[in-house]
Image: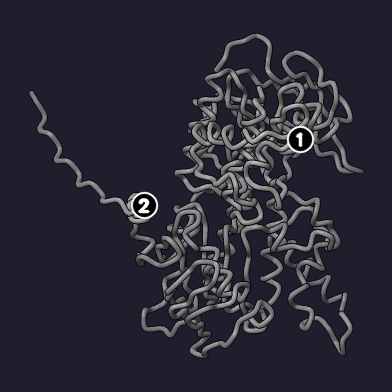
Amino acid sequence: MSQASKPAVRLSGIDKSFGNAKILNDITLDFAAGEVHALIGENGAGKSSVGKIIGGYYTADAGQLDIGGIPLQQATPRGALRQGVAMIHQELQLVPQLTVAQNVFLGLEANIAGLLSGSDERRFAALEKRCQFGLDPRRKVSELAIADRQKVEIMRAIARDARVIIMDEPTSSLTADEAERLHRVIASLCAEGRTVIYVTHFLDHVLAVCDRVTIMRDGRVVRTGVVAEETKQSLVEAMLGESIDVAYPTLPAAPDAGVAPRIALDGIATAAGIHDISLVIRPGEIVGLLGLVGSGRSEVARAVFGADALTAGSIALDGQTIGEMSPKKAVRNGMAFIPEDRRKQGLVLAQRTRANMSLPHLDQISRLGFLDMAEERRRTARLIAHFGIVPNSVDGEVAYYSGGNQQKVLLSKWAYGKPRVVILDEPSRGVDIGARRRIHDFIVELAEDNVAVLLISSELEEVLKLSHRGYLMRAGTIIGELDCPHASLEDVLFRLFNVQKPHASPTPPKLD
């Protein structure tokens, strides 16, 4: 880390409120040139808000922000960019109908005498050589998976040649290999004297790549420390103000292999690129899909829930083959789906908490076509308490909730009824350690209630620790099955990458 006396960024006494809610309180903090500085805390702790103050997206109510020793001249994203600050957002800020290259260089287009030139692809090739993300510059962003869109955001920030880059949950949709590649890019940026402000819930990443860490709680700085002196447990205790078990919950016993499947897929295929998918999930069983980004995991989830039409194969529920599936039919048959993009596919952000939770279950709380609002409020309040949703208001504005609390609302939406099958696609993406543990407990609770669970996550360890069995996927099809509690992460990675695992070398004899 650079020992330069003048910090790259300095916040002094920063306050920020929205209405009566104070989200930042007297934030005084320095970020040095050439360092990776982590900001961590629970959802709602204020870490993303600090990033948005530095990036010019929020204007502070009080205090001062200096960039390179100079006060921020204009508290807008463009003003911050002029002073060398770029931000990668957790909720992606891309233009779907533009190509990858057009998004990366938006506002930075090469031109000659005011006319656009054709050099952007050459510039993109140089940037790709640095990042090695494997993106097609001509492809529209609307056609990309969430993980690939996140890579576009990262490339866009790097393309702006910023001296300070704020990364808000940059690895939340990336595989371990992709995250490692990003971390190498971050190291090269810092070697050039740039500052990376790393907002994340992945404490292993903090310990592996960051120089210093600032822990926040309830809109205040708890402390800043050198990462080399921290452990995962010390970080968690500082974030929460108390000790918490960071291990995965204990799985209930797996159902006997002779138990009839709750759901069975037989050779299904869709136009989205999956083919010959056959798997079974028994009541009380958690089954994981393990694969790299683009392997077809999310496409299987969409097919099961009826979001994508089948072009071949069939789906049976409790032994009864279901004809043409649709989301409405899936819900009617007791199926629930938590998609990976909660804001666009899971929640109605214009609606309040109770409306989001009750939406698929209006028939349960209606009498003669009229909504029983008292019953809706009772059910919503019970789930808010059960999941620890903050704020604890049945009429809370979900659009302004933190990512973790939005995810809890989405889970509550499907806990509202009594599902028989629950599909979870990236259920803990972008949530804090406390919310993450609550989500993991919920998954186990489902299995204990005899629900069949299909779990998808880019974190292979999460799938292995929370699943009874797993199916390995590559190129849109299943390539193998494994017993998750007895599988190693190393074995899974070798199989997914289709690489022969080397035999261990014999231990050399000790020499006297």
Name the residue carrying label 1. Answer: 52
Q: Are marks 1 and 2 in contact (CB under 8 Å)?
A: no
How far across and how far down the image is residue 304, in percent? 55, 75
**Residue pictured at 20% horizontal, 44% vertical:** 504
**Residue pictured at 59% horizontal, 25% vertical:** 225
Spatial CA span between label 1 and label 2: 38 Å
Would you say 178 lies left or right of 28 here?
Answer: left
- Please name which of the two marks, 1 or 2, marks the residue nearer to the observer: 2
Question: Callout 1: helix, strand or loop?
Answer: helix
Would you say 276 lies left or right of 133 here?
Answer: left
Bin the neighbour count of mark 1 within 10 Å (Cα to Cα): few under 14, some 14-19, many 20 and up.
many
**Residue pictured at 72% horizontal, 59% vertical:** 344
Bin the neighbour count of mark 2 within 10 Å (Cα to Cα): few under 14, some 14-19, many 20 and up.
few
How far across and how far down the image is residue 395, in percent? 86, 61
Mark positioned earlier in the residue sequence (1 or 2): 1
How far across and how far down the image is residue 313, in percent? 47, 81
Question: Callout 2: helix, strand or loop?
Answer: loop
Residue 214 visible in rendering:
yes
Q: Amino acid at mark 1?
A: Lys
